[in-house]
Image: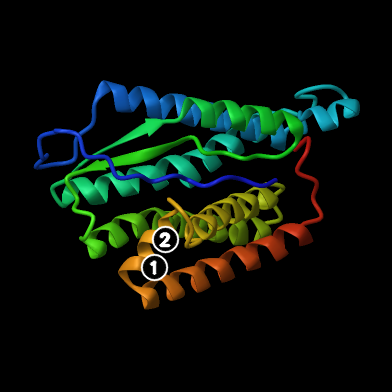
Amino acid sequence: MTGGPNFYYTWTPAHPTPSRVSTSRTEILHLLLAFGVLTFDLVILLGGGGLLSAGRGGLFAFVSVTVVLAAAAAALTGFLCHELAHKFYAQRHGFWAEFRMSPMGLVISLITAFAGFLWAAPGATMVSGMADYDLARWGKTSLAGPVTNAFFGGIFYVGALATFLVGSAYYPWFVLLAWFNGWFATFNLLPFGPLDGAKVLRWSKPAWIVAIAAFGAFTAVATLVLYGVTTPLLGA
């Protein structure tokens, strides 16, 4: 299961500078649609419902309440909270910032999910008023997303440890959620194109090196643990 970039663009229309964190009906609608589609994508994949797996019992043959909850938790912490972190950091520093979904990106995510993998670019946090030469502000705004993923990844690691110690069958799901957040953070820190890592690197090379190394190690450990889990996730 692979995925695409979490795009993050500069947008400079005429908007009043907010003095506090704010939102709009448009942003709420876009967030809910993007969250819903990404959750659906993950349900398809975690439930073994991709077209490549149809021979195992048909689409959604292994979907359960656990699968739906895990997919929603992954989309919420890995994607939605990541985007809101960009938004909140920018707005708390006096800039207009709102999320806008990408209809084409959402369609592509659905197509790839049914094919058995995920390439997702569900949307972007648009920011207005932040000067292009303000590299520090851009870098810190961009870093807020991956840091949020690391925070949730750490919480899921603790949950994995706790459930493992008590012998709970939910242990693999916590590992999966930790891995998803670590992977999302690490991927977005790659220093290419519109990814967060490009802006962090332009701001501070040492900050980027520390971040990519820490989150990369986090993801590597989660990957090793995930592959070492023997309890089957499907049908849990």
How far from the left and from the top, in percent, is residue 133? 21, 60
Vertical comparison of 3 with 182: above or below: above
Q: Is residue 228 above or below residue 37?
A: below
Image coordinates of residue 64 in percent, x first then y, are 70, 28
Q: Which of 151/145 is in front?
A: 145
Image quarter (top left, top right, bottom left or bottom right) of the C terminus: top right
Within-10-Å neighbours for mark 2: few <14, some 14–19, many 20+: some
**Which residue is at 49% across, 69% downward?**
212
Callout 2 amino acid: Ala
- Decide: few, some or many residues near mark 1? Use Cα within 10 Å; few <14, some 14-19, many ≥20: some
Label of residue 201 in the image: 1
Could you tell me the amino acid type at mark 1? Leu
Residue drawn at 59 percent across, 36 percent down? 71
Measured from the top left, where is residue 231 in percent x and y?
79, 50
Q: Could you tell me which secondary element the residue under label 1 belongs to? A: helix
In this picture, is 56 found above or below 150?
Answer: above
Which residue lies at the image location 56% right of the left edge and 60% below the top edge? 157
Q: Image point 76% across, 28% down: which residue?
A: 49
Q: Secondary structure at mark 2?
A: helix
Question: What colour scheme was applied to this rendering of the protein?
Answer: rainbow
Q: Quadrant of residue 125?
A: top left
Residue position for label 2: 198
Is 43 or 158 nearer to us in this picture? 43
Task: Give the x, y percent position of residue 99.
Answer: 34, 35
Of residues 210 and 229, the one nearer the viewer is 210
The answer to whether marks 2 and 1 mark residues whose Cβ atoms lie closer than 8 Å is yes
Q: Which quadrant is home to the N terminus?
A: top right
* Residue 113 shown left or right of residue 99 in the figure: right
Q: Please state if 42 lies on the left or on the right of 25 as rendered.
A: right
Q: In the shown orientation, is residue 203 left or right of residue 119? A: left
Q: CA distance from mark 2 to mark 1?
A: 5 Å
